[in-house]
Amino acid sequence: MPWLRISMDCARADVEPLLQFLDRLGADSVSIVARGDGALYSDDPAAPEYWRQSRLQALFPIDAEPDILIACLRNRLGTARAESLCIDELDDQDWSLSGRIGLEPLLFGEQLSICPSWVAAPPDRRVLTLDPGLGFGTGSHPTTALCLDWLSARDLRGSVLVDYGCGSGILGLSAVLLGAAEAWLVDIDAQALEACRVNAERNLLLDRVRFLSPGAAPDRPADLLVANILLNPLLDLAPHFSRLVRPGASLALSGLLATQAGDCLAAYDPWFSMGSMTFRNEWALVQGRRRSAASAD
């Protein structure tokens, strides 16, 4: 299936705001490639590194309205910076090749690495092979990195984990690599579940994952749940999440701006004992434990 590709140049400081804006416009995926000097740079050691000048390439469904998208981006970028905007059609094979520039293995905790298939895997790591594609999640976005750091810091051996809004399956598959007995991958998007299936098969993990629609009722409660989505669905899903996990189960929620974390904590407090928050740039992860049935329900 062809896709609508919109490309634009931007400075390092504009990458994160533009990624958020493109997501709100409905981009299915965005790649970042270097322009000019290939050196990565960041003022803050804790912040993601980007090139001083980058080119963003965003994919939209072929039936998107290009005039509206371009108008929104021109308004967001301003007249001078909008001169770099261009739009064309791209098929899936071209997209997979264009995303290879500048990608390196990503490391999380002491054990985990997320690595594209064409890059040599780092030694002495549990490696999840994951290529950029149409399922959201390659580990580079701060919220995904927050979730992967959270998983890497836990003893997952023998546990069952729910990855709700799984996208590419990166969180659930990583959990299995780190010792979880099983991951339940949940998404409303059939294309995302198919991407999960492909990624699970490539990493020889297919026998340790289950693919579920949001309305499915598992036959037993899980030990952990992680969801990297957006604030409004997280608020709506709090009662449902409480039914998916056992008392004492661990919970991690991201996809949140730091300014939204308080609202999320309050929404989950009736069912979960909410604990500390973790931040990366303007993004947050909140965590908690499922209260006992007697105290919560």
Image: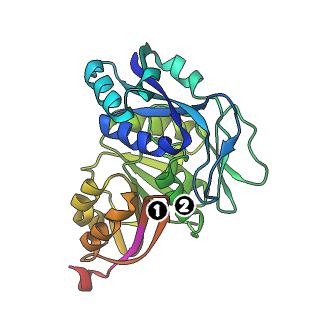
Q: Hey, what amino acid is under mark 2?
A: Ala
Q: Which mark is residue 1?
A: none
Name the residue at the right extreme.
123
287 inside magenta stretch = yes
Q: Where residue 71 appears, x then y in whole percent? A: 29, 25
As displayed, is residue 123 above or below residue 150?
above
Element on which disc 1 rests: strand
Q: To which residue does mark 2 refer?
A: 180
Cα separation between marks 2 and 1: 6 Å
In the displayed structure image, the side of residue 123 where residue 103 appears, left or right: left
Q: Please tell me which of labels 2 and 1 falls first in the chain.
A: 1
Can the viewer see residue 224 in this picture? no
Q: Hey, what amino acid is under mark 1?
A: Val
User: Which SS type dominates the magenta stretch?
Assistant: strand
Front in this rendered view, residue 89 or 193: 89
Q: Do the residues labelled 2 and 1 touch (CB within 8 Å)?
A: yes
